[in-house]
Amino acid sequence: MGFIIPVLHEKFKNSKIIALHVDGSIKASENHTNAVSLCSNDPLIVQAFLEKEIPDINASLIRIIEWRPSVNHYREAYVKLLSIVVEFIKRTDAEKRTTAYFGRRWIRNFFKNLKLLNQTVLYRKARLPVIVTGSGPGLETALPVIRNMQNNCLILAASSSVMALSSAGIQPDIVIATDGGCWALRHIYPFYRKTKESQRPADKTGIFAVNLSAALPSQCADMPFLILNDGSFWQSIILHELDLPSIIIPQKGTVMASAVELAIVLSGENIFLAGMNLSVKDIRTHAKPYGFDYIFFNNAGRFNPVYSEFFVRSKLLRDGGSMDIYAAWFKNRLELWPKRIFSIGGNNEIFVKTIPSERGAVLKKTGEYFKAVSAGYDQKEFCKRGVKALISALKDSQYKENLKTELAPLFFPNEKEVSDNDLEAAIYEVSK
């Protein structure tokens, strides 16, 4: 009933107190300025509430205080609420650590990729099913189905799945790339080579759906970009200034989440997921062939067989816990997504119940759904104009605080106070 809140307030005067209740019929006494409360165990409502109340998280500073008798009374409802909170803290903390490590690189990639931009993609909503492919081992069992459906649907592939698709003779219509790490280039090179070999028109295949903060090779200058805006204020300012069309797809930590969100935007028909294992059950971590296979084979030797390399890799992924975080996120998200998302091949068990009893009529791939258009400016001018727009907004009192809130953690993750001059200098530095 909230009786502990005054005690906590007295002992930790500078701490924010968040009270979560299973039962809304009990009136809680929480009349304190630094206390907020919610009564719900709906995953989407609780997560949205926590995201609002804890915008910047440091997991080491958070304490969960349980009222244990609630377990005996509310049982499963209480356990569900507690698990939602724990999953939120794990996921958000992982995102914060990733931001601290990659923040400056993301912004550097953004300005670098502006210099690669020659064509952007316009689209209209397709009346075609979409197959979204990840690189999990389950993709291999789905390949025959994808091969039979490829002329009657759109194939939206995570860049890490392109090698496996290409080896099966499948050409994806759209490849999505959101990873800012340099290793991501190993997944993109095969797609670039296959697109050049196909010699098909750019507005019919070879489309890159990219967040401009992703790591992209210079060869991508020949490709049309379907730009994904992560919804951040700083990205929106630049894209608006440059009049570049984009689709708002917030970053979720895994490219597959972005891919599903994009599929929902691009098509009004059914969406089929493949290669989404989201778990490691043996030494097989990805479908074959895979962009990083060369690392394992190059390191292998008589005293270090390739199976040992795979074993170490799978153990690192399993112990890291990221797969569990993603699986929990997808499980909750499925309740919000349209009831037209199905599973083919060997996916995670959370998707098993979504397999349709019958697929229904399959439409032929007809009509023009994508159009590549010239960006209209010199690439170097893009970068200069983007920097100028961002600096101008940073000096505007109307936008200043929002921009500093976003940019300071990216450039200076370990500093509490960042001056305007430091931010301006950092922006100029990464844009060169």
Image (cartoon, rainbow, N blue to C red):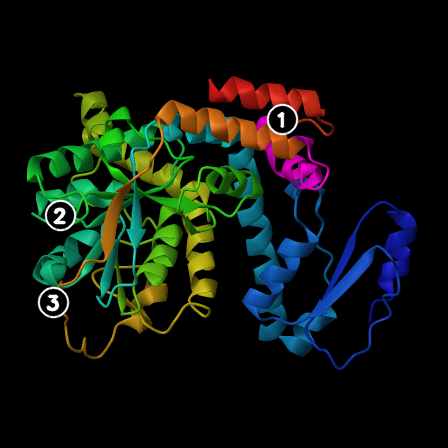
- In the rendered structure, which disc, 3 or 1, sits on the residue that comes first in sequence? 3
Count the labels in the image: 3
Residue 210: x %, y % from top left: 35, 41
Read off the residue under disc 3: 364
What is the C-alpha distance between the residues marked 2 and 1? 41 Å
- The tag on residue 412 is 1
In this rendering, position of residue 361 left or right of residue 54: left
Eyeballing the image, is 171 above or below 407? below
- For label 3, the crowd category at 10 Å Cα-Cα, with few meaning under 14, some 14 to 19 and many 20 or more, is some
Residue 23, quarter of picture: bottom right
In this rendering, position of residue 57 left or right of residue 308: right
Residue name at image x 58 percent, y 74 percent: 76
* Of 74 and 35, the residue lying toward us: 35
Discs 2/3, front: 3
- For label 1, the crowd category at 10 Å Cα-Cα, with few meaning under 14, some 14 to 19 and many 20 or more, is some
Span shown in magenta = 395-411
* Of 291 and 76, the residue lying toward us: 291
In this rendering, position of residue 224 left or right of residue 382: left
Amino acid type of disc 3?
A: Lys
| Residue 396 part of the magenta segment | yes
